Image (spheres, grey):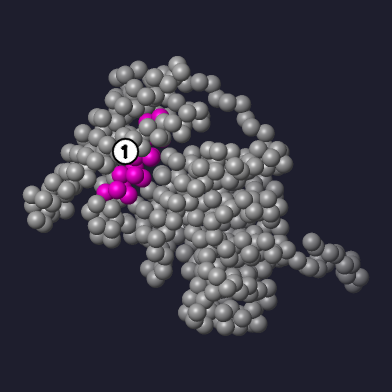
Amino acid sequence: MIDTTEVRATGWIQPVVTAPILDVVIPVYNEETDLGPCVRRLHAHLRANVPYPFRITIADNASVDGTLAVARSLAADLAGVEVLHLEAKGRGRALRAAWSASPAPVLVYMDVDLSTDLAALLPLVAPLISGHSDLAIGTRLAHTSRVVRGAKREVISRGYNLLLRGTLAVRFSDAQCGFKAIRADVAAQLLPLVRDTGWFFDTELLVLAQRAGLRIHEVPVDWVDDPDSRVDVLATALADLRGIGRLGRALFTGALPLRQLREQFGRAPLAAPPARVPVGLPRQLGRFALVGVASTVAYLLLYVATRGVLGAQPANLLSLLVTAVANTAANRRLTFGITGRRRAGRHHLQGLVVFGLGLALTSGSLALLHAVVAAPTRTVELTVLVAANLAATVLRFVLLRYAMHHQRGG
């Protein structure tokens, strides 16, 4: 809310700010070294480049070092900096608490390391302030984004977003970029439905927003990986898989009041697109081959990226699961011409059955290789896996084609 008072000497109406328009929330845990320089840099950028009243909220997630003291010192030195202390860890928990208590109509989330170039902040919030969009996210996967990070994180990030597209049918491109904004009225309706308190929090929020018909604006960003990141990749990946399963069940059973939210925000469903004409066998084979090549490349990249951390068999399981889900989604739409949600769950279940057969083939091949050769080279491992995947690919085409064509008329 902005009040105005008349300035008699000039006749101008001088705005007097009584509340922030933006609240930039920074969740932190044990960041005593980086917190001060990063917040001062953010504060200077907001004062120089953002023409809206703002507040910076440092949400301390039960830090056990000097982070809280640094945060309170910043609040004493810089106008518009607030501190929120939580007794329990969890990025989602911190965002829920800070956003729920904020007086600002536009709520922002940003990682403390400021990996995202701050030049994208104004394009992020402007569509929300104007009323054009309901949420906004930074994306590192747009063609115009410029990203500096290692191959392992690149593969994991793209694999995760492919998994979301295959399992939850998301349309946004980058779920986990630490650079997001939401209108406060939208947050008030969605936050009570979000159960996760950790790293899956914003993915769950975005999926619910999409299913409720809300408009999500994407902003290409320049992003530089923080080499000192404390994120436990394996633990986060497992938690995300559990979150996907839980959210998928809730959506499938209709346990979430998404229709009511859609009606409340005035987002009537669009007319369904016309049914696509079934594709003939020769073109199916060609499209299936292209999808198969892309899936195999993604599988090998993901396997190489995770092999050193997880070991051969776990890396094979994770890589095959991620690419199998994405493969089913791509073949369903591109190869067999099936769109919409009708029987999507059944198709993915059948895809997972084929995944089980492919896992048996690849895991068996790996086990046989290691039984015959004591210490096979990575090249030999990949050669065996490619051969096993080719056999699994032929099996996948036969079974998926039968299942999806059989169900067209049923």
Name the image quarter holding residue 235: bottom left
Residue drawn at the location 55% of the way across and 38% of the way down: 253
In the image shown, does 127 or 47 lie closer to the viewer?
Answer: 127
In the rendered view, tell whether residue 295 sits above or below residue 19: above
Q: Magenta includes 215?
A: no
Report helix, strand or loop for mark 1. helix
Asked whether residue 60 appears in the rendered view, the answer is no
Q: Position of residue 18 (x, y in %)?
A: 79, 68
Name the image quarter holding residue 355: top left
Amino acid carrying mark 1 in the image: Phe
In the rendered view, tell whether residue 124 sits above or below residue 37: above
Q: How many marks on residues?
A: 1
Residue drawn at the location 38% of the way across and 40% of the way down: 325
Residue reaching furthest to the right? 8
Asked whether residue 3 appears in the rendered view, the answer is yes
| Residue hosting label 1 | 355
In the rendered view, tell whether residue 104 sits above or below residue 396: below
Q: Magenta includes 331?
A: yes
Q: Is residue 174 left or right of residue 394?
A: right
Name the image quarter holding residue 268: top right
Q: Position of residue 320 (x, y in %)?
A: 30, 44
Residue drawn at the location 38% of the way across and 68% of the way down: 227
- Type of secondary structure dominating the magenta stretch: helix
Residue drawn at the location 36% of the way across and 45% of the way down: 322
Q: Which residues are magenta?
A: 316-332
Q: Position of residue 19 (x, y in %)?
A: 75, 66
Q: Residues within 10 Å of mark 1 (few under 14, many from 20)?
A: many
